[in-house]
Amino acid sequence: MRLPASRRPAALALACCALAATAVLGAPTAHGQPGACGNRVAPPPPVDTSEQVPPGGTPPPALRVPDEPVGGDKLGGCGLVLPADAPKLPDGLTAAGWVLADLDSGAVLAGQDPHGRQRPASVIKVLLAAVVVAELPADAKVVATAEDTAQECTCVGLREGAEYTVDQLLQVLMMVSGNDVAHALARKLGGVPAALAKMNARAAEWGALDTRAASPSGLDAPGMSTSAYDMALIFRAALKQPRIARAIATPVVDFPAADGNGTVVLGTDNRLLSTYEGALGGKTGFTDDARHTFVGAAQRGSRRLVVVLLRGEPQPLRLTEQAALLLDYGFALPPANPVGRLVDGAPKTTNPTPPTSPTSGAIPPAEVAGAQDLRDPDAFGTIGLPITIAAGTGLLLGLVVYLRKRRARAVRAAATPD
């Protein structure tokens, strides 16, 4: 419809105002997301002092955000990522980020903020376990030290001076989530900094580019980061190792008692193993900053699915119960309509970021350069935003001048005799 001539200046003004407002406030984000992706670059701010950098230390730089979302473009969305005509999600889900994927084909069936960066808590022990089985023989001996037993617990109860095999420790690392055990295994790998470097190298090799292990146990530390996508990727790769698959599927085990007298029976902290038919095992986690986390898998017929939940709350349902609901949902989805895939290796890049341990205090040049190239859909950057505001302001000023001149001409024309 064509507007009358008398209303065209007003319409033009409204259109220009709308254009300027869009430029200043921001257009809709990529992938059709209506809001800001607040965790595109880093996890939420910590709630305590656990991530303070020691005096003289250097805060680790933010991990670079890949130019293209790993696993497919749809996985770059920060809201729900569902296949077409997907059924309604179950009620009671609380996780800020979650992923459902096929363990065998790697097809990602559904998710929410798949690459949103969160803290892993103890689910990062799956990555530590993967490094352990790759480098340490099952029967290698580890002697517990006072430093192991002094770790912030949850702890298994290692006894200083007692000798354990690597697989004894691996078993309870997966079942009981002992931070004393994680520290002992990290020492066996060459010390905590060396273990972290190996964990981060393995994550980068697999394509888990949202992940940085800052402690071997999952305790919060500067630079800790992962995503629901990455934990699905890591768990899938780790589960291919028979030693890890056995450990997470074990409900109870005898373990040397902390007082040196006989053994005690330790049970898995993963409730899914005993409550969900076809459960293959999994790993739980919790810290004040990470909140509740979970990764697990189950089999129904010939299909095996992995589910990851990060930054969840246990009300109204425990996280393992939420995981069970998502597994039921995933098994009901057709396998031929994925929203992405779990990659089988790191994507090729012309500017790779070398994996480092954040405890080293060094900032890799590639990460410093990459920090200027972070894709954060909720921000224009320190240069783009001022330019955009200036352009919008100039447009409005120009419009005001034009309208004033037009009105002055009209007044002069009315005052001139015919």
Image: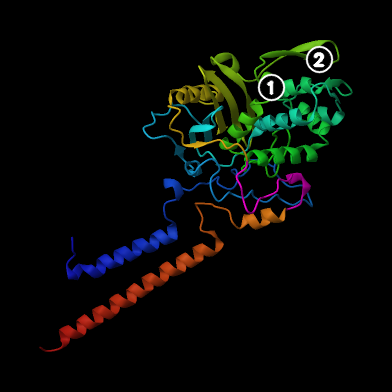
**Which image quarter: residue 383?**
bottom right
* Contact, mark 2 vs mark 1 (Cβ under 8 Å): no
Whether 195 is drawn above or below 10: the answer is: above
Q: Residue 242 — which label? A: 1
Amino acid type for the residue under numbered disc 1: Pro
Q: Is residue 34 visible?
A: no
Q: Main secondary structure of the magenta part?
A: loop
Q: Earlier in the sequence, mark 2 or mark 1?
A: 1
Q: Where does residue 258 sit, x and y in percent of width and height?
A: 82, 17
Of 63 and 6, which appears nearest the observer? 63
Magenta stretch: give its range: 346-363
Quadrant position of the N terminus in the picture: bottom left
Whether 414 is drawn above or below 355: the answer is: below
Q: Residue 367 — which label? A: none
**In the image, what residue occupies the spot 81% across and 15% down?**
256
Q: Is residue 247 left or right of residue 327?
A: right
**Which image quarter: residue 393?**
bottom left
Q: Is residue 379 visible?
A: yes
Q: Which residue is mark 2?
A: 257
Q: Where does residue 250 sit, x and y in percent of width and height?
A: 67, 16
Amino acid type for the residue under numbered disc 2: Ala
Q: Residues within 10 Å of mark 2 (few under 14, many from 20)?
A: some
Whether 407 is drawn above or below 294: the answer is: below
Task: Residue 226: say if magenta.
Answer: no
Q: Secondary structure at mark 2?
A: loop
Q: Farthest right residue?
A: 161
